[in-house]
Amino acid sequence: MKLASALSFLFVTSVAGFAPVPAGRAATKISMAGTNQNPFGNAQSLEYTGGTDVNNKNYSKLSEKLNEADIERRKIAEEAERRERAAEIRREERLAKIQYMHDMPDSQPAGTVDEFMFKEGVQDQLDKLDRDLVGLTAVKQRVKEIAALLVLDKMRRKLGFETSVPSLHMSFTGAPGTGKTTVAVRMGQILAKMGYARRGHVVLATRDDLVGQYVGHTAPKTKEMIKKAMGGVLLVDEAYYLYNAANDRDYGQESIEILLNVMENNQDDLVVAVAGYKDRMDKFFSYIPGMMSRIGNHIDFPNYTSEELVKIAAVMARELEYDITPDAYNTFQKYIELRMELPYFSNARTVRNAMDRARMNSAIRTFERYAINGENGGFVTVDDLKNISAEDFQILVDDILYADADKRIFG
């Protein structure tokens, strides 16, 4: 009896869509409109029969995903094949180069050093350095050594030897007016002639050019100066002012970090030269060891002697087409020796200022003679226009010897 009741319940449930009907009662008849009526309500049938638009869209998206994945796999495979082929080409080139170097006799000519020096215009720049800079023998020798390295490096390249761009970043230490900027300009031109710099120009920068006054101002200023110097030399004068040991929040540290990054990653397109007094630069390097380690060329510029400064005056006069009379040189040297004992002496800069004052004295003297006094009918000779005499320099000497201390004009 119980078995019959259970069977009756299961039968009624299956027919009525799982609506339980107690045994012994008449099952309510459920209307089935259509042969494919889903007994589970409005949900779609689990059996796919061609489907609706939704199913078609889902299928289309799945196909697209599969196609994209297949394209991506092909791209990855092609890229891997390209890298493998490139690596194979590099291996073949290296093996060919090794074989070439092995078969090449030791006497294989690469050309003479003079040919490379003159062909690239390097010798011309070195000659200009000799003409324009008086003294500084050690500095000129160091510049020639750097030029020699670059020339020999190019000769090695011609024969196929392995080469790498040497560290060309520089440190120039010395007092003001000792020729640091002039040497930087010459080095930029040498690097351009040798193909180590695209333009060979020199951009001079100080702290004010690199460091901002507020947060977010330093990086754009530093990057702008670096952009201007790309392809040449960035000369940072008095570089120790970039670092303020007394202030951890000084913005100069940000500028230094940017410079260090550029010196490391862009050394093939930018040479950074830092300059300043030697004792201060040494202290600066102790604070920023990363700067010291990135600089491969340290050049110290000594002070000029009085004799060398007189020769510098002669060079300046020649460039400006003036003639210094023979007796005027002795007077000028006397002035220089006195001036070297006074504050703010700046080597060649002091000479330049003294020459400017001597030219002014010469002009005043000539003007008084011909314009005011009417000498020679007011006609001035070429010799008068080019002449710098002893009395023009004597005024500078008297200014030191006899003028009141507060009225002295220091050149």
Image: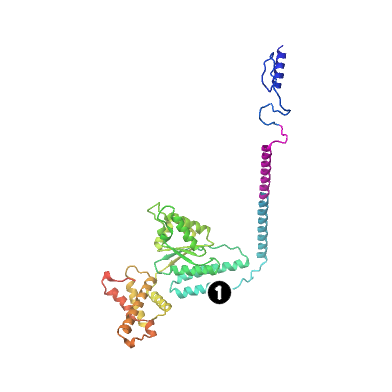
The overriding secondary structure of the stretch rendered in magenta is helix
Where, quadrant-wise, is the N terminus in this rendering?
top right
Eyeballing the image, is 29 above or below 193? Answer: above
Viewer-nearest residue: 293 or 260 = 260
Can the viewer see residue 324 in this picture?
Answer: no
Viewer-nearest residue: 135 or 71 = 71
Check if residue 28 falls in the magenta segment.
no
Numbered range of the magenta stretch: 47-75
Eyeballing the image, is 399 above or below 232? Answer: below
Q: Residues within 10 Å of mark 1 (few under 14, many from 20)?
A: few
Given the image, on which type of amino acid does mark 1 rest? Phe
Q: Position of residue 31 (x, y in %)?
A: 70, 23
Q: Position of residue 78 (x, y in %)?
A: 68, 51
Q: Mark 1 = which residue? A: 118
Where, quadrant-wise, is the C terminus in this rendering?
bottom left
Q: How is the image coloured?
A: rainbow
Q: Residue furthest top?
A: 1
Q: Position of residue 360 (x, y in %)?
A: 34, 77
Q: Is residue 221 left or right of residue 38?
A: left
Q: Which quadrant would residue 150 be assigned to in this image?
A: bottom right
Check if residue 50 falls in the magenta segment.
yes
Eyeballing the image, is 43 above or below 127? Answer: above
Task: Check disc 1 and report its element: helix, strand or loop.
Answer: helix
Q: Is residue 264 left or right of residue 380?
A: right
Viewer-nearest residue: 206 or 337 = 206
Can the viewer see residue 111 in this picture?
Answer: yes
Q: Position of residue 186 (x, y in %)?
A: 48, 70
Residue found at x 39% / y 72%: 348
How many discs mark residues in the rendered view? 1
